[in-house]
Image (cartoon, rainbow, N blue to C red):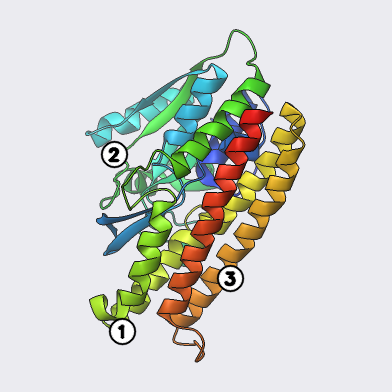
Amino acid sequence: MEIAFEHRPTAHCEDGVTANLLRHYGYDYSEPLIFGLSASLFFVHLPFIKLAGFPVTSFRPLPGVIFARVTRLLGFKIYNKIFFSKKKAVRALDRLIEEGTPTGCVVGMYFLPYMPLAYRFHFNAHNVCVIGKTDDQYLLSDPIATEKVTITSHDLLRARFAKGTWPPLGKLYWIKEFPKKLPDMNKLVRKAILKNCSRMIREPGPVPYVGVNAFKHLGNKIPKFPKIYGERKAALHLAQLIRMMEEIGTGGAGFRFLYAAFLQEAAEITGIRALNDFSHRLTDIGDQWRVFATEAGRISKNRSTENLDYKTIGDRLKAIGKQEELFFSDLEKAVKKS
């Protein structure tokens, strides 16, 4: 059985599954709008949570938050469920497919055979949408794939119950009910922007690991990597940071570009033309993230020059942090006074 589901590739998996699910039911929202409404542009460095042996650095909230926030704001009722029994997890998914319900699924990327080898690492927060099953194969809409893909029941089950950081526990999620009326998008967009600004510059409070505080915290820590870890592990830690930026989801720069696109759309929705200028500012910041990733990559591969070392990129990260703090402060003021 195959559900008549339109597959569209997107920049980020959870945004993509959310947008594709909503479109399936006749609600066509862009990926940037989905991301912006969820107020998910973020930065966090968590030394007490490890991924591949190194602290987690993330540029978005926890997996599942985007789908939950956006559907709630738009007035949809959803259902999500985790499983401790693999048999129950399989039966639940098969039942939903038989009912014709496209179903979001959280999986570990390492166990997805259709992924290029470079992307098959232990990251357990990838999102796909299951849209069919034939014999022993499931049909998936994976937002980072150009076309629909297939996977065996065995491989999908392994991916759904991958071990390690953030184990997915067979998680499924789907849409149950639709909004009775369309929301006031102008109001929602303004509220979402202010919420994102607050999350970055105010809600972290004195905590050094989240929001704008995390830039200074990690920027001061990077120059100490060789002393803390030794040369080899310092390079691996830096490589892990780049992977979180550039390969897991859309990463640091990519999320900035995505939010910049949202601000352009928000300018049309709200009539706040100044948001176009903020879009350009954030695009420039995203470019600086790309430079940071390039320089960090050179160091991790031992291709740095005399003028490039751990202190240099630590300082660059702190400089980016200062720009983002000013950006979100100015953005908040602009929306509040409009």
Q: Is disc 3 placed on a helix, strand or loop?
A: helix
Q: Residue at x 55, y 74 (%)?
A: 294
Query: Considering the image in quadrants, where does the C terminus appear?
Result: top right
Left-right relation of 180 to 138: right
Q: Which mark is residue 254?
A: none
Q: Amino acid at mark 1?
A: Glu
Q: Is residue 109 above or below residue 243?
A: above
Mark closer to the chain start, 3 or 1: 1
Residue furthest to the top in view is 180
Q: Are marks 3 and 1 in contact (CB under 8 Å)?
A: no
Q: Which residue is mark 1?
A: 231
Residue 96 position in % (x across, y down): 44, 24
Q: Is disc 2 placed on a helix, strand or loop?
A: loop
Left-right relation of 261 to 105: right
Q: Are marks 2 and 3 in contact (CB under 8 Å)?
A: no
Mark closer to the chain start, 2 or 3: 2
Q: Is residue 17 above or below residue 178?
A: below
Q: Amino acid at mark 3?
A: Val
Residue 166 position in % (x across, y down): 30, 46
Residue toward you, 69 or 99: 69
Q: Residue at x 41, y 71 (%)?
A: 239
Residues at marks 2 and 3, CA–CA distance in whole angstroms: 37 Å
Q: Is residue 76 above or below residue 278?
A: above
Query: Is the residue marked by circle 1 packed among few (<14), some (14-19), or many (20+) residues within 10 Å?
Result: some
Residues at marks 3 and 1, CA–CA distance in whole angstroms: 22 Å
Mark closer to the chain start, 1 or 2: 2
Q: Which residue is mark 3?
A: 291
Q: Which mark is residue 169?
A: 2
Residues at marks 1 and 2, CA–CA distance in whole angstroms: 36 Å
Front position among marks 1 and 2:
1
Q: Amino acid at mark 2?
A: Leu
Query: Is the residue marked by circle 2 packed among few (<14), some (14-19), or many (20+) residues within 10 Å?
Result: many
